[in-house]
Image: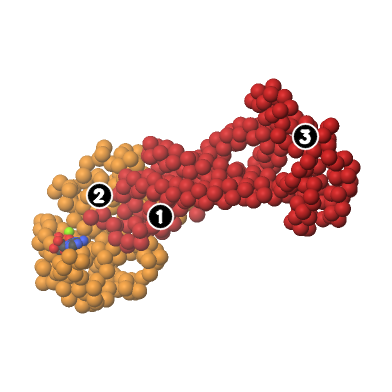
Chain colours: A red, B orange
Amino acid sequence: MFNNFKYLVREGLRNAWANRLMTLASVGVLVCCLVLMGSAVLVSVNISHAMKWLQDQNVVMVFLNSTVSGSDASYTVSDVRNQILSVDNVDENNIEFISKEEGFQSLLDRFDEKLRIIDSLGDTANILPDAFRVGFKDPTRYETTVQQLKNLDVVYTVRDNRKYAEKLMGINKTVTVVGVWIVGLLLVVSLFIITNTIKLTMMVRKLEISIMKSVGATDWFIRMPFLVEGIVIGLTAGILSFALVSYIYSAATSAISSIMSAGALPYMSMIWWLLLAFVGSGVLSGALGSLFSIGKYLKDDGGVSGD
Amino acid sequence: MIEFRNVYKTYDNGTKALRDLNLRVNEGEFVFIVGSSGAGKSTLLKILMREETPNSGEVIVNNTRLSTLKHRDIPYYRRTLGMVFQDFRLIPNMTVFDNVAFAMRVTGASTKAIRKKVPYVLAHVGLAEKSKCFPNELSGGEQQRVGLARALINNPALIIADEPTGNVDPRMSFEIVDMLNQINRNNGTTILMVTHEHALVRKFRRRIIEIQNGELVADSGPEVDYYV
Ligand SMILES: Nc1ncnc2c1ncn2[C@@H]1O[C@H](COP(=O)(O)OP(=O)(O)O)[C@@H](O)[C@H]1O
Ligand SMILES: [Mg+2]
């Protein structure tokens, strides 16, 4: 059966080539589908990564409602520090005072040139309060500790990273839902196109198929070249979209890492998984498309004498 | 070898193609099937090829009840048959050699076995020199001999030919039937051949079955003198 295998693969390649316009169309649609699917997955994975990073920080910003630095200070820094340390979960080794000037500067640094204009306004533009960066000893008591900090008189508000995490989670859900719909739709379209490409080959090869049936070819023997054709389409699309997404991702991550301190997931860490996923889903859709198109045709025992 | 018992075939559109057909063909017989157009001759052959199934009745070929054949058994059943068609059914972009080899490859034969057997069978039908030709480079008679070579390649016990000389000039028609006759005589292969050509039927003097309106109306009787 193995010299047959070689023969059948060659036949499949011949089909794909003889039918190259439709093959190309199928590859194109499948590439679109895979690129969108891959992007959605990568965005979602990165959001999860950022979320995890935020949660792992286990650190909150405690903004104070009255000034503790400068000439008009109503409390001293160490007074407030002691108040904050009175909350038992606060880690005394991980607490840092950030004056409003420092906070403003770091904000400016983060946004770079675009906000230089604000810088030029000087101190009057600084509406940031003084703050403490506070770490927790026990991350599991996060919620209650945040609440305890908020209850302190001196505290104006606590910037809660978990809130950001929740927001990200919301975005992530939207990306996932939208992604699933787009991908589902495109998958149907790709399957439809692949199925039609292969049906076209089948029309061209009708005589051959009927002769195959008349001389006693099994279903698998008849199916194989079409399966190969579908797999060739899927494989090509898988590799192309992998290359495309890799390019987009490396361009996007360099942009993202400058804004987001969490940074994007390095591509290299998942390159094999991604290659596998792209090629795998490409090949799977190609194979399914060809099996769909020929399935009904094979069920029929007729078509031997061809009329 | 072949037995039809009370076979009825009605197509989906209501056409009654066969009505209560009873027929027995022994191993090694050569049978001409005659009858006017639309009589049901091709339907009878299609039932034998397991391309159509009867609505009722039983067909037995080589001890196989065709009604018990499952979809996956059909290819293996068909490998025991050789089929020859009026329109030759050759693949245009394959050489004579490849057209014949194709039927062998389908059965999972090795390239080595194919290289050995195909030239032998082509020589047998007098086409040794034409093995690299394409079908459109051959006359009708030659194309049908390629069809015959393809039908013979897997050593079938039964050859079914539906108007094999319909697209072949008279002199070549004689040659083709003569070849079938030789195959039958030398190998004991059972042959069923549908034809409209009375000259051929008279010339070869083998068993004749006539079908009209889906019914068997005349039968010259089994050729008991050839195989007992
Ligand atoms: N697939 C089919 N569907 C419907 N009617 C058919 C089909 N095949 C043949 N028939 C009808 O069945 C009858 C017998 O056809 P056929 O067996 O081909 O006759 P013959 O080969 O003797 O000319 C004809 O009336 C023909 O029109
Ligand atoms: Mg007919």
Q: Please tell me whether mark 1 sits on a helix, a strand or a loop.
A: helix
Of A232 and A240, the residue lying toward us:
A240
Q: CA distance from mark 3 to mark 2?
A: 93 Å
Kind of residue sitting beneath label 1: Phe
Please tell me which residue is depicted at 61% across the width and 31% down the height of the picture: A251
B83 shown above or below A110: below
Badge nearest the viewer, 3 or 2: 3
- Report the chain holding disc 1: A
Could you tell me if residue B76 is visible in this image?
yes
Which residue carries the number 2 mark? B88
Residue annotated with mark 1 = A292
Looking at the picture, do discs 3 and 2 lie on one chain? no
Instruction: Give the image location of residue A3, x and y in percent.
Output: 50, 49
Q: Secondary structure at mark 2?
A: loop
> Where residue A298 sits in the image (x, y, percent)?
36, 58
Closest to the camera, between mark 2 and mark 1, is 1
Pointer 2 local density, CA inside 10 Å: few below 14, some 14–19, many at least 20: many
* Label 1 crowd (10 A; few <14 / some 14-19 / many >=20): some
Kind of residue at disc 2 = Phe
The crowding category of the residue bearing disc 3, from other C-alpha atoms within 10 Å (few below 14, some 14 to 19, many at least 20), is many
Tag 3: amino acid: Lys
Do marks 2 and 1 share a subunit? no
User: In the depicted view, which residue is nearer to us: A15 or B141?
Assistant: A15
Q: Residue A100 got which mark?
A: 3
